[in-house]
Amino acid sequence: MSELKIGVVGLGWVAGAHIETFKQVTGGRVTAVCSRRDLDPAALQAQYGTPLKVYQDYAQMLADPEIDAIDICTPHPFHAEQAIAAAQAGKHLIIEKPIALTWDEARRVRDAIDAAGVRAMVCFELRYSAQFTLARAVLDQGLLGDLHYGEVDYYHGIGPWYGQFPWNVKKDMGGSSLLTAGCHAMDILLLMMRAPVEEVTSYATTSTSEIFAPYEYPTSTVTIVKFAGGKIGKVASIIDCLQPYYFHTHLVGSHGTLLDTKLHSTRLPGMIKTEWSTLATHPVDSGDVSDHPYQPQFQAFVDATLAGERMPLTDFDTALETHRVVYAADLSAQRGTPVALSELA
């Protein structure tokens, strides 16, 4: 196989960003879309600048031998069954987060992927952002020493001004604050801390603003994360805030601290103790998917899949572990007690 031909299921805001991104990916090409709407192929070609075969029946798309991979961009509750069906049809997988709304569903997806022997990735694309590529380099070069504390927080008011708002507010669609959005922050915390999670304690609340009243689940959560080896961390997932988008990162180590894009390190002689040094990079500062770093992630997936290898950073198993921590956090908030990760085996 010299090219990965991709079928996109679901044709909303995120799918549009995926289709546009694949135009910049070598070896991968979107060739088909599946939507419940009656779409005009000519209009789609005019919109996206590439010919697209149109399906309304997902099973028919999966039966197309010319499609090598399925890109799942539908609302959250459809992800698990669509991923399982695609794996059973022998298709590689790109899955928008979340993988599923429950741990049991996520395990079923894992089992289907393993049984079929297909490649899969999950869209935790912030791991490929310039900001966190640089942060990983700071850690790799030992500028922070040994991390013992980290906090990564997601502040993004998802209100009526977002197209997904009408369905995202429903418990059986959005799932939770972490599942619908804040899982990006949890994923980056796990990437940075580099240690298995042993236990989580989570608390949940919600805004009294009428703007966010339609939500059927708590819209603000804070989770304390206990890692193996004694490290600790914190993730806030706040989707009912009225402020500019803010993806907060604070990593504290034995030789320095990284605060968003600011650094202080005792391993860089000559630094002024009372001032931060700013790292010139492109920060994660928008919830607009058109600004997200899909291109390097999709390129890594295509390259690895064509080579028959597992992709770096956002392979399915790595993303599943982030989801496992999220499910444990939601369970902790529901119970009002700490939850050991061993409960979710």
Image (spheres, rainbow, N blue to C red):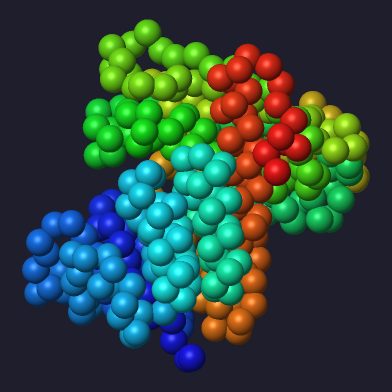
Q: Is residue 248 left or right of residue 190?
A: left
Q: Residue at x 57, y 28 (%)?
A: 330
* Residue 246 placement (x, y as % from top left): 50, 32
Q: At which x and y percent is residue 331? A: 59, 26
In depth, the one of 301 and 316 nearer the eye is: 316
Q: Nearer the viewer, residue 153 or 133?
A: 153
Task: Tell which residue pokes out farthest to the top in this image.
Answer: 208
Numbered disc total: 0
Quadrant of residue 336 in the image?
A: top right
Residue 124 in sight here: no
Quadrant of image for the C terminus: top right
Image quarter of residue 18: bottom left
- Residue that protrudes farthest toward the bottom in the picture: 2
Quadrant in which residue 119 is drawn: bottom right
Q: Position of residue 174 (x, y in %)?
A: 38, 35
Q: Would residue 341 be found to the left or right of residue 185 on screen?
A: right
Residue 94 place in picture, x, y as percent: 46, 63
- Front-most of residues 255 and 193: 193
Residue at 29% x, 20% y is 214
Q: Is residue 90 above or below residue 58?
A: below
- Does 317 sit left or right of 1 as displayed? right
Question: Which residue is pictured at 41% across the width and 12% down the height?
Answer: 207
Res. 206 visible in picture? yes
**97 in relation to 59, above or below:** above
221 relative position to 265: left or right: left
Please give the name of the residue rendered at 58% of the width and 69% of the height, measured from the top-left corner: 115
